[in-house]
Amino acid sequence: MKRQEDLEIMLQNGGLDIRLKEICGGSREQLLFRRERLLSLIHTFASIYGNGRSLGLYSAPGRTEMGGNHTDHQHGRVLAAAIDLDMVSCASKNDSSVIRVTSDGYPEIRVDLSNLNPVKKESGTTAALIRGIASRLSEMGYSVSGFDACVTSQVLGGSGLSSSAAFEVLMGVIMNDLFCGGELTAVQIAQIGQYSENVFFGKPCGLMDQLASSVGGITAIDFNDPETPEVEKLECSLEDYGYALCIIDSGADHADLTDEYASIPGEMGQVAAFFGKKVLRQVAFEEFWSQIPALREKAGDRAVLRALHFYSDNDLVVQQKALLQAGNFEGFLSLVNQSGHSSAECLQNIFCCSTPDAQAVSLTIAAARRILKGRGAVRVHGGGFAGTVQAYVPLDQKEEFRGKMEAILGEGRCHFLNIRPGGGTVIA
């Protein structure tokens, strides 16, 4: 925590440039943008909550999933990365029992910490996430009180880049700094965010989104023991291999799909329950394969197909990690395509059965493959059903790809992103 005027001077004089470069990477132009963004955020905070206070600056990135589609909730493996679109916050204790959060374009959220139980009318809201994080920290023995925070975000809601996870990590980082003495690890902050989303927000998500945002960089994660997931950072520069990562907004609404998302862990869970287990990672593939006739009768064909996808994608992550470590990026891309086909054919998360005429993700994937002409890779991104598609685009095709995709989907639909080195963190 630093005085407002000291933070402003540091930013203006470049005193935080090294820190910002460590966290975000990027060019000199991007660094100057981040300086101005943080200065503007401090001024916004002062205009709402008053001048001259001791402040902290915080950041949490969005994430992209590089391997392992819907494997985390079955205690499987994933390959994920933090991206250079983030949420940043300026925050300060307010000596009350109320958390006040103002985000760009939204009314102020107030959460009274005199009640740390789930509030039914808050289900599905940002307030529920804040209350859930504070509640979990209180259960862990930390004394959480009120604070004021302003938040600005580049991680658009419904973009498939996990704005909710970035927000959860951001709130966890703030509370860890203000009330926990910085004792919590990146993994603990991610787990607290997942708990809040599961129990208070009401969405049965896995842990991958929060962990990718919290840890940063490219990470191979094994959730075999979700209490202590194995996390390994990988060194890999897409640009060095001649590729750029593109997230394509299909134009379909990514919101209000909780039931569709829930059906996937629900059906995979039915298959696991057939064997007396909670998740598929606890069931050997050979045992599953031998019981497919009985499983079709018990759980239905779609549940069996979704289980097949889990086993396939869970194994692919191991191979993808090995190929990246060996520097075989073309081999990695071939497995990205393989995973994409499995998501479409077995996981079946590229459109909703209830609205068969709306298939924006399927159309986006088909168009991207045609434009790439066999180069790179394309797959559904994240939860699926609507939202975004991930493409690895050769650098010499970037502008052609953008132009042709946006001619179909509309201007501003292609977002070329960089991998961010740092995860959720205190900037200053």
Image: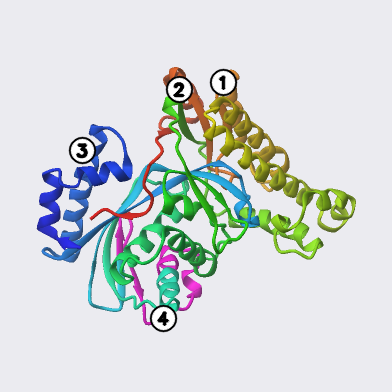
Label located before the other in sequence (2 or 3): 3
Identify the residue at image location x=34%, y=51%.
87
Identify the residue at image location x=67%, y=53%.
264
Compared with 412, 274 (above or below) is below
Q: Is residue 305 visible?
A: yes
Q: Nearer the viewer, mark 1 or mark 2?
A: 2
Q: Quadrant of residue 329?
A: top right
Compared with 416, 210 (above or below) is below
Contact, mark 1 vs mark 2 (Cβ under 8 Å): no
Compared with 144, 255 (above or below) is above
Q: Nearer the viewer, mark 4 or mark 2?
A: 2
Q: Is residue 127 covered in magenta?
A: yes
Q: Which residue is mark 1?
A: 375
Q: Is residue 248 covered in magenta?
A: no
Label located before the other in sequence (4 or 1): 4
Identify the residue at image location x=42%, y=25%.
240
Residue range in magenta is 101-130
Residue farthest front in this picture: 326
Q: Which residue is mark 2?
A: 242
Q: Position of residue 61 (x, y in %)?
A: 39, 48
SS label for mark 1: loop
SS label for mark 3: helix
Q: Amino acid at mark 2?
A: Gly
Contact, mark 4 vs mark 2 (Cβ under 8 Å): no
SS label for mark 2: loop
Mark 2, Cα crowd under 10 Å, few <14 / some 14-19 / many 20+, is few
Q: Nearer the viewer, mark 4 or mark 3?
A: 3
Q: Which residue is mark 4?
A: 115
Which of 204/328 is in front?
328
Horizontally, is 182 left or right of 196 in the view? Answer: left
Q: Nearer the viewer, mark 4 or mark 1?
A: 1
